[in-house]
Image (cartoon, grey):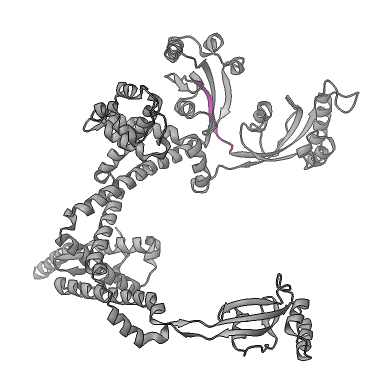
């Protein structure tokens, strides 16, 4: 019984000890004052500092310890900033809000528009759809045209066939003869609103709304959808149909193409036949090779044939407006991974889809915030009483004074008056000194309204987006630390001219004006030649004469090999010259790409700088030294105040969380 009780007590104690042991992330690695730094916080900060968790995991305990020292100091400074009420400092708050607004707008555009839009664009481009449409061309009365299109769509919904309505109503004469078929396409090849409708419609169904584009109004039907062949590589033999005959007066183009096709099927070499017979001068000489190409880059009959073939398959003769083609499909390129296609796609996305996605997101914000624009006010402001330009002078205009407090844009929670609108316009160079008109004001109001909406969304991001909240927290901490450095270090550094003069006298040997040399050179890439030139000098020939005749350094013959004044350490040439006495020449020595002899014409020896010359370096060194002293003094005061403790042994557990 006692054994059982003892085992029970041990078990209970074990449970208690286990439950009391801190979780991995809650292990305290340092404390200061009443503040703890946990292992979880340390791991996150360290990984962020070194560029990611994979790098952090492989790092050494020694580096962990160094970082912990720095991080504790950083945290003590932040704590001190809050004690000083920096969080209530109006100037710092304004700076933070300004940054939040600017960064928030860019963050929204990237996270809410570009990133999801780009991924959706990539996913859609992995498929291709085939669509037919009924088109109503754009005209002056847009509303009437739209109503006509909607009436036709209603008739289809009520039982009329799509094909019947194409023949009766479509104004696209090119596709009408094929029941509205506009062929296969993938994302990025058609107008965005058209693509959006097509990709959201099941095969065999009609999109339930009329689609508006710059060309008019469309009713769409998706007739097919399949995985996309990203790119194909093919070769072809073209037999031109020139009237009814080709090259041979007794053989028609089709008959000739059929004969060549039969030879290929029987085992003849496609490349050789293409070089012999193809009427395509561009590809014929290359065995008919067309390289890689995408859907819709070739004429439709050719495109239809090659994208329905299998690798190594040879087509029957295919007729296009160019003649008859025998096609061989050689390769199908797989659709790239998102990471590999990202950079190329981003440029394509920006050109074809971004504006559509941007406008769509702005419309969502308009609904979310109850946006309204006072168009009548803009019409009134844009009426021309005389030729008026958009400039600061307009602010003295009587009409502006009457309307400057009138609301031009409203949200559910805020109103924006004409004066703030004109302040925006005058800050944008593209509107500066432009003639004031209703069109200009409406264009400007659209951009101004978009900025209002994005800034409004940005002001709320911290509450809804953890990543953005973390970014803002980092920036806030940064401006607090910067303010502390100003208050405790930089603003306290005082330049003392007496101390600077004393420092100069003690350390002036460090401040040197480098020596200079003026020299001429004889240069050759051939050692035997330079040796013969050296012998000429030995025989008494003037250095300038030898240099003028023989030096091989480009541009230096006419200058007698003269280099002019150079710093003594500028090159191997100047270093050699500095070792000489004036008008003495050197031995032969190796230099860049060859061999050289130099003669010293003039030497200016190195010297100690005067106090005035050394002053900029002295001041800089003094400020650096004083900054380090003040920084050390401030950090020591924080340590005295908060008395930090460092539990380095706990760092052995870093990035080794228990497996669950």
Residue 118, image x, y percentages? 45, 40
Magenta highlight range: 218-229
Does the magenta run of residues contain 299?
no
Residue in the foreground of this view, choosing between 20 and 604: 604
Left or right for 291, reference 495: right
Query: Quick one: quadrant of the C terminus?
Result: bottom left
Question: Where 439 sits versus 158, above or below?
Answer: below
Residue at the location (18% across, 73% down)?
Answer: 637
Query: Quick one: quadrant of the N terminus?
Result: bottom left
Question: Where 632 sits versus 316, above or below?
Answer: below
Question: Where 103 sits versus 572, above or below?
Answer: above
Dividing the picture into quadrants, the one containing residue 618 is bottom left
Residue 574, image x, y percentages? 60, 81
Residue in the foreground of this view, choosing between 437 and 446: 437
Residue 317, image x, y percentages? 76, 28
Residue at the location (78% across, 89% down)?
Answer: 535
Dividing the picture into quadrants, the one containing residue 596 is bottom right
Counting the numbered discs, the total is 0
Residue in the foreground of this view, choosing between 6 and 587: 587
Q: Is residue 21 in view? A: no
Does the magenta run of residues contain 222?
yes
Q: Predominant secondary structure in magenta?
A: strand
Left or right for 102, reference 208: left
Q: Is residue 236 in view? A: yes
Residue 420, image x, y percentages? 28, 35
Residue in the foreground of this view, choosing between 20 and 363: 363
């Amino acid at each position: 019984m006692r054994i059982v009780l003892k085992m029970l007590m041990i078990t209970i104690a074990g449970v208690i000890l286990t439950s009391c042991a801190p979780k991995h992330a809650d292990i305290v690695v340092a404390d200061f004052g009443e503040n703890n730094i946990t292992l979880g916080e340390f791991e996150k900060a360290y990984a962020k500092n070194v560029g990611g968790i994979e790098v952090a995991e492989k790092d050494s305990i020694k580096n962990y310890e160094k970082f912990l020292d720095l991080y504790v100091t950083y945290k003590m400074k932040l704590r001190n900033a809050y004690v000083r009420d920096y969080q209530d400092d109006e100037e710092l708050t304004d700076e933070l809000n300004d940054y939040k607004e600017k960064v928030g707008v860019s963050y929204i555009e990237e996270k809410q528009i570009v990133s999801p839009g780009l991924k959706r664009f990539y996913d859609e481009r992995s498929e291709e759809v085939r669509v037919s449409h009924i088109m109503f061309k754009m005209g002056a009365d847009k509303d009437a045209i739209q109503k006509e299109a909607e009436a036709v769509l209603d008739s289809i919904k009520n039982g009329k066939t799509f094909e019947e309505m194409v023949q009766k109503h479509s104004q696209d004469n090119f596709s009408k003869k094929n029941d509205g078929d506009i062929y296969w396409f993938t994302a990025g090849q058609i107008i965005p609103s058209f693509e959006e409708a097509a990709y959201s419609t099941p095969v065999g169904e009609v999109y339930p709304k009329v689609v508006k584009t710059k060309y008019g109004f469309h009713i769409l039907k998706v007739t097919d959808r399949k995985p996309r062949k990203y790119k194909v590589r093919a070769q072809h033999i073209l037999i031109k149909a020139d009237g009814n005959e080709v090259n041979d007066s007794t053989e028609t183009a089709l008959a000739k193409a059929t004969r060549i096709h039969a030879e290929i099927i029987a085992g003849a070499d496609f490349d050789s036949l293409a070089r012999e017979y193809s009427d395509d001068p561009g590809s014929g000489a290359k065995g008919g090779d067309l390289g890689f190409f995408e859907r819709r880059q070739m004429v439709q009959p050719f495109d239809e044939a090659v994208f329905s073939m299998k690798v190594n398959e040879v087509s029957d003769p295919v007729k296009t407006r160019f003649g008859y083609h025998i096609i061989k499909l050689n390769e199908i390129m797989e659709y790239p991974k998102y990471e590999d296609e990202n950079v190329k796609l981003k440029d394509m996305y920006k050109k074809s889809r971004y504006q559509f996605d941007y406008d769509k997101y702005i419309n969502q914000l308009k609904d979310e915030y109850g946006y309204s624009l006072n168009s009548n006010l803009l019409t009134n402001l844009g009426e021309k009483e005389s030729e008026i330009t958009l400039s600061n002078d307009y602010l003295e205009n009587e009409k502006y004074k009457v309307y400057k407090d009138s609301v031009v844009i409203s949200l559910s929670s805020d109103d924006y008056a004409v004066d703030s609108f004109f302040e925006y316009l005058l800050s944008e160079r593209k509107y500066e000194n432009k003639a004031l008109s209703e069109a200009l004001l409406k264009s400007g109001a659209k951009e101004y309204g978009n900025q209002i909406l994005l800034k409004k969304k940005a002001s709320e991001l911290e509450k809804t987006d953890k990543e953005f909240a973390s970014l803002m927290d980092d920036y806030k901490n940064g401006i607090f630390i910067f303010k502390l450095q100003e208050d405790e270090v930089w603003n306290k550094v005082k330049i003392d001219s007496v101390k600077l003069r004393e420092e100069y006298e003690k350390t002036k040997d460090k401040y040197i004006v480098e020596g200079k040399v003026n020299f001429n050179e004889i240069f050759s890439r051939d050692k035997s030649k330079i040796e013969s030139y050296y012998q000429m000098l030995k025989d008494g020939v003037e250095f300038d004469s030898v240099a003028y005749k023989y030096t091989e350094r480009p541009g230096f013959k006419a200058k007698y090999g003269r280099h002019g004044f150079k710093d003594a350490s500028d090159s191997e040439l100047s270093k050699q010259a500095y070792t000489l006495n004036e008008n003495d020449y050197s031995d032969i020595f190796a230099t860049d790409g060859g061999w050289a002899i130099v003669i010293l014409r003039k030497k200016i020896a190195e010297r100690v700088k005067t106090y005035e010359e050394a002053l900029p370096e002295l001041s800089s060194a003094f400020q650096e030294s004083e900054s380090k002293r003040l920084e050390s003094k401030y950090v020591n005061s924080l340590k005295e105040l908060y008395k930090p403790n460092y539990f380095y042994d706990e760092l052995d557990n870093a990035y080794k969380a228990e497996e669950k």
